[in-house]
Image (cartoon, rainbow, N blue to C red):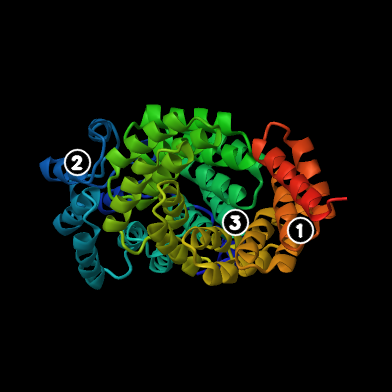
């Protein structure tokens, strides 16, 4: 889809037709908009502006309620202009069935009904809009884009359709076209709150955070009870670096929609950023209760348990995640960390190898795998991983340190000393001075070893090991040179 719609989006700004007198809305259009989650406020405005072309009888009410309309909307329909009986249309039973299935999130069952309807009415823009909405819900952005585009060609001047195209461009990481389509939607209907939201998302995609926040505020000015707009504000504020304000925005979204699992999950992420791990865990658990099949929640929860040091809980969470979704590719690093803390090095090595398969250029993964292999006494394999770690990140003092350790244990003292000197260049810690001294002692270079130990003692005078090793070396030096 990317790039393909550029000319379309641009031309839409230039070729918006002069709007004819709007026709009353038929039940097909309302059901299609409901399937596309057009807001209750927008639907109310539309019927007030245009009236309706169907009788608000038992069948129509049943169809609209089955599609998820707010009961108050049905009362609104009784106050708007209705076409004379001879000009009225009906609510198609098949479309009402499809809309009810979409409301219940049975997208797979709803789609063939829509396709059958389109066989008899291929030029109906509302049916294409409804099919596009189903394909969007099923994650098929390409076909959703095609159907929304066809709907917009069949019904020129639809703000709702251009708004949906804006969202699809945003999902395709095409901020410029998202902005263009949202502005087209707003040129057709300046009160379209959803179009302002998607304008904000396009600006967010282009890292224009202040402008994005302004667009979201414009959306809220038109629909103040929009949990989604507050959610988008939270996303943008976190990207802007204001975690506390992002948390407040997510809390507003949750207050408006307590079932909004994504807001709970993202609030957990922000609370984690703020170091409030217990609060983050509480939000993730609520998100998990609301969306038990969502792998990302369990991944975030497992990572938070790792950071808290609750390794048993982390292991249990990731085991549950991988049972649920064996193809999930994240979390292996954290699970390996938990196994390392539990001294289950075999399991840690297995997880680290999986992590490296998924990200072979991650220096940290190779380094930690090298450490685990060292703890298992597998020096040859450890040396291989640690050399890769150093090659991938030559400025990592830890990678040089552990490569030096592996070389020392393999009795390659000169090479080990070189690695510890590199580690010292990057991190002049007492530990690195101490290990360099150990290499020098093994090479018989006592004078330089003593100098390194003296620095280590100065840096950490409370470390008894360094002082004891220094005293041992002094005795060794005296014994080897009795004069």
Nearer-N-terminus badge (3/2): 2
Q: Is residue 31 above or below residue 215?
A: below
Q: Is residue 68 above or below residue 117?
A: above
Label 1 – label 2 distance at C-alpha: 82 Å
Quadrant housing residue 401: bottom right
**Residue depth check, mark 3 versus mark 2: number of the one nearer the observer:** 3
Nearer-N-terminus badge (1/3): 3
Nearer-N-terminus badge (1/2): 2
Residue nearer the viewer, 60 or 419: 419
Quadrant housing residue 83: top left
Q: Is residue 6 left or right of residue 37?
A: right
Secondary structure under badge 3? helix
Secondary structure under badge 1? helix
Q: Residue at x 51, y 31 (%)?
A: 247
x and y percentages locating residue 3 in the rendered image? 58, 70
Q: Is residue 64 above or below residue 184?
A: above
Q: Residue at x 23, y 35 (%)?
A: 74
Farthest residue, direction left: 58
Q: Is residue 406 left or right of residue 430?
A: left
From where the camera sits, is residue 36 visible? no
Q: Is residue 328 above or below residue 412?
A: above
**Residue depth check, mark 1 versus mark 3: number of the one nearer the observer:** 1
Q: Which class describes the residues within 10 Å of circle 1: few (<14), some (14-19), or many (20+)?
A: many
Q: Which residue is mark 1?
A: 440
x and y percentages locating residue 59 in the rendered image? 12, 45
Q: Which residue is mark 3?
A: 175
């Amino acid at each position: 889809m990317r790039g393909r719609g550029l000319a379309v989006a641009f031309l839409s700004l230039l070729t918006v037709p002069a709007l004819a007198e709007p026709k009353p809305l038929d039940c097909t259009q309302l059901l299609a908009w409901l399937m596309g989650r057009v807001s209750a406020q927008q639907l109310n405005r539309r019927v007030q502006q245009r009236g309706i072309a169907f009788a608000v009888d038992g069948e129509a009410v049943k169809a609209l309620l089955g599609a998820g309309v707010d009961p108050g909307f049905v009362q609104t329909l009784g106050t708007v202009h209705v076409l004379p009986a001879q000009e009225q249309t009906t609510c198609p039973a098949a479309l009402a069935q499809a809309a009810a299935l979409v409301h219940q999130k049975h997208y797979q069952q709803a789609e063939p009904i829509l396709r059958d309807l389109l066989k008899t009415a291929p030029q109906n823009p509302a049916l294409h809009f409804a099919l596009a909405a189903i394909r969007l819900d099923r994650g098929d952005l390409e076909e959703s884009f095609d159907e929304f585009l066809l709907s917009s060609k069949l019904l020129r001047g639809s703000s709702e359709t251009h708004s949906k195209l804006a969202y699809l461009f945003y999902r395709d990481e095409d901020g410029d076209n998202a902005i263009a389509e949202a502005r087209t939607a707003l040129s057709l209907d300046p009160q379209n709150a959803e179009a302002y939201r998607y304008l904000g998302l396009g600006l967010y995609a282009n890292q224009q955070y202040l402008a994005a926040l302004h667009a979201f505020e414009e959306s809220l000015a038109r629909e103040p009870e929009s949990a989604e707009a507050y959610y988008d504000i939270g996303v943008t504020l976190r990207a802007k670096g204001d975690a506390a304000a992002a948390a407040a925005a997510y809390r507003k979204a949750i207050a408006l929609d307590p079932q909004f699992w994504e807001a709970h999950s993202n609030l957990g992420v922000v609370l984690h950023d703020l170091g409030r791990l217990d609060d983050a865990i509480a939000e993730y658990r609520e998100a998990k209760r609301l969306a038990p099949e969502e792998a990302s929640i369990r991944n975030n929860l497992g990572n938070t348990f790792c950071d808290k040091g609750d390794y048993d809980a982390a292991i249990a969470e990731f085991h549950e995640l991988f049972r649920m979704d064996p193809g999930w590719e994240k979390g292996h690093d954290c699970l390996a960390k938990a196994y390392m803390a539990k001294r289950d090095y075999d399991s840690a090595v297995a997880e680290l190898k999986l992590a490296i398969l998924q990200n072979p250029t991650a220096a940290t993964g190779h380094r930690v795998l090298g450490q685990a292999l060292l703890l298992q006494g597998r020096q040859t394999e450890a040396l291989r991983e640690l050399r890769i770690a150093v090659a991938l990140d030559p400025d990592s003092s830890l990678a040089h340190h552990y490569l030096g350790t592996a070389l020392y244990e393999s009795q390659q003292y000169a090479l080990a000393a070189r690695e510890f000197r590199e580690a010292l260049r990057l991190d002049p810690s007492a530990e690195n001075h101490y290990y360099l001294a150990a290499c020098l002692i093994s090479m018989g270079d006592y004078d330089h070893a003593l100098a390194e130990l003296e620095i280590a003692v100065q840096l950490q005078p409370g470390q008894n090991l360094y002082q004891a090793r220094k005293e041992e070396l002094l005795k060794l030096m005296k014994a080897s040179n009795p004069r």
